[in-house]
Every structure is written in structure tokens, then in C-alpha cells.
Image (spheres, grey):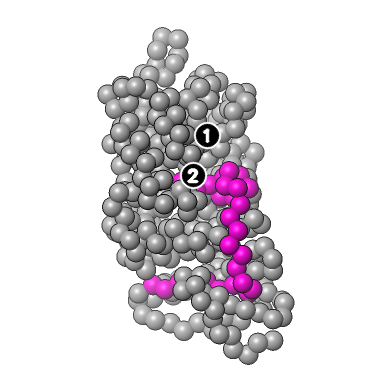
Amino acid sequence: MLEVFFITASSLILLIQAQDGISTPPMGWSTWNKYGCHINEQLIKDAADLIVSQGYHNAGYTYLNMDDCWQSNERTSDGHIIIDRENFPNGIRPISDYVHSKGLKFGIYSSAGRQTCAGRMASSGYELQDAQTYANMGVDYLKYDNCNYDEGVSAKTRYEIMAKAINTTGRQIFISVCNWGTENTWEWAYQYGHSFRTHDDIYNDWKSIVEILNVHATVVNNSGPGQWADPDMLEIGNDRLTVDESKTHFSIWSAMKSPLILGNSLSDMPSELYNFVTNKNVIAVNQDPLGLPAKRILHVAHDKDIWVGELVNQTMVVVIINYMDQHQTFNIDTHYCGYIGSDIRAFDLWENATIPMKDQR
Ligand code: GLA
């Protein structure tokens, strides 16, 4: 059994800032984790409807991101990317317009290589042309992947070319550098994007989440407003994580200030899991105006983690992960967690309740 809870040192302010994804981590939904390459116009439009009608948008989820496979694997003779006409017979612009008409933002995907990871046409060599195509489509978010690049060209160079091309369009587009933590991503990606992946792809199981956390913990220091370290999209609701694992996944992603990009079916999310991913208290931690990631201050493999982060108004968040299959008792010394104030109050975000403190100093 896994357990997690949050405490804060003074009452939590439920203030969610303007969610442009730069001053606070982006929140949205992506096609990839659930649907992979099986995407089409109707799926995207239905997703736009559901993000709004199911209350995800009200909870803060703003981006609708179409991942790999909207492209064919060809270009026209003058270099324009050819869309997968079977699944997107009307092109992309009407879909983007539809997404915008719902008050959402529209995301798209390509790769800093010749082909995407699924073998569709990608942007290497056509960056200026593609960036303009995305701007013309009304794209607000570009996830830029790392597959099928020419050997010998550094990631830094490849991502820089696209960042400059996007800049040339004059359109404000959030750039998600998806190069899986290779070539010390965290040292340079902030110059060319607003978020950067720190690890290979998430898989839909707890083992993958633990592996990602172990890497992410070592580089999360480099995360902050406009340069969010990205441990990958959420797997909550995709049937493999237990309820406790799902809750833990959401707790720690929120506290690390990770982009919160859902990857579940929006039409049949179990209500318990839906309540997790729309929990106002926990989302407020993710969207805290300071934008400082929680850092791991204690790690005992297969046993426990403690992560601590600073929030606005002399508030801090503490995430405790119990990796054991049994209950554990944790005595948390708030001074040990770095809090030096007096008059400390603790609050359990999931229970929405004050935690009695022992031995207040
Ligand atoms: C890579 C990325 C994934 C997804 C797929 C699409 O593996 O890391 O998140 O975008 O490509 O093919």
C-alpha cells in the first residue's frame, strides 16, 4: 500500500494564476498515452468538448495537445508537410479553430529529426517552413521530439534552430523540448523551450514512475518559471496504476511543478481518479506563483521519500511517499524540512483538513 500526504506550514492560498504555461506549469491533455497513433479529427473535437463539459477546463487544464501521427510521411514538392488525409480530411486549421472556440489552447507535435518517432514527416531541414505552418494552423504549443535526427548534429543545435524559427513567426508558442534528458538537457534546454523532458518515456506502471523520480530528483533544481523540468505525461486513468499509486503520481508531479498533461480517456475516467486530477488544493500547489519545484530531501530506496518545496506566503509543501506495502508512521520535523518560522500550522491537502501538530516550537 502506498500513501502520500501533503502538509503546509500555514494555510494554503487557493489562488490559481493565469495559466499560460510559462509563469506556472502548463496543464492540459494529450492524445499519446491513451491513443498513440490512433487519432483523428473526431477524437480531437470530442476531447475538446469533454475537457470543457467534464470540468477539466475549470480545474485548470487548458491545452489540448495532438501528439504524433497527424502527419503523413510525405511533403509536397515545395516542401509543405502533407497531413494524414485519411484521419484529418479537413486539415488541421478547422480542428484548431474548434479547440479555440471552446476556450482551449491547441498543441501539436513534431521531431527535431527527419521523421517523428512513429515514422511520420518531421521538421529537420524544414524548420522555418514548418514553424510558419504551425503558426498558420493556430498552434499554441509545440512538443518537439528527438527521433530520427542526423548523426553528429547536437540536440542543442537542432532545438535552437526550431526555437528561432518559431520566434520568427511572431506567434507565442509554448515549446516543449522532448529530448528525454539526453545530452544534459537541463543545462541548455531553457534557452530554446519552456519545458524539457528529463527522462525516457513514461510507461503505464509504478516501476516507471519510480525510475523517473530517481532521475528527476537529481535535476529538478534546474526547473522554474518558463523552464519546467518535465518528467512526462500523466498515466492516471489508464488502468495499470492502483488508486494509491495514482494519487501519489499526481501528488509528486504537482509538487515538482511538472507540466500536468493528462493522458486518459476523458469520457470514462473513474470518478475517484477524476477527483484526484481535479483536486483544487493539489493543483494550487502545482500552480503556485513562486514556481519553485519541490526537492527530494530524503530517499531510502523501496522505503520512503520526502520532498519539500517552498510556496508563496511562507508556505511549504511536503510530500511523503511510502514505498512499502504496509503502513508506516512518519514523524516530520518541519525545521528539518527547512521551515524556520514559528506558529506553524499543517494542512493535509487530500483530506482538506488541518493536521494536529505535536510539540510546536
Ligand atoms: C516519443 C515521445 C513520446 C511520444 C512518442 C510519439 O517516444 O517521448 O512522448 O510523443 O514519441 O511517437
Q: Report whether 145 appears left or right of 20.
A: left
Q: Nearer the viewer, residue 253 or 24?
A: 24
Instruction: Identify the residue shown where x is 39% and y is 16%.
Output: 75
The magenta segment is 2-28
Any part of residue 13 in sight: yes
Q: Position of residue 242 (x, y in %)?
A: 32, 65
What's the residue type where badge 1 is placed?
Answer: Asp
Q: Is mark 1 within 8 Å of ligand 1?
A: no
Assign a secondary structure to mark 2: loop
Report x, y in % for residue 27. 50, 48
Q: Residue furthest top?
A: 77
Contact between marks 1 and 2 (CB within 8 A): the answer is no
Quadrant containing the N terminus in the rendered view: bottom left
Image quadrant in which the C terminus is located: bottom right
Residue 152, percent from left and from top: 52, 30
Instruction: Report the number of numbered marks.
Output: 2
Q: Residues within 10 Å of mark 1 (few under 14, many from 20)?
A: many
Going 31% across and 22% down the picture, which residue do you hit?
Answer: 89
Q: Name the residue rendered at 47%, 25% in the picture.
A: 137
Q: Earlier in the sequence, mark 1 or mark 2?
A: 2
Look at discs 1 and 2 and give the one toward the viewer.
2
The answer, for residue 185, to whether it is visible in the render is: no
Say which residue label 2 marks.
Answer: 62
Residue at image point 40% right, 36% down: 66
Question: Is 75 placed above or below 184 here?
Answer: above
Please name the amino acid that badge 2 sits on: Thr
- How far across and down, in percent of the image, does residue 338 sit? 67, 73
Horizontal side of 331 relative to 67 (left or right) equals right
Residue 264 circle label: none
Decide whether residue 333 is among the magenta residues. Answer: no
Residue matched to label 1:
140
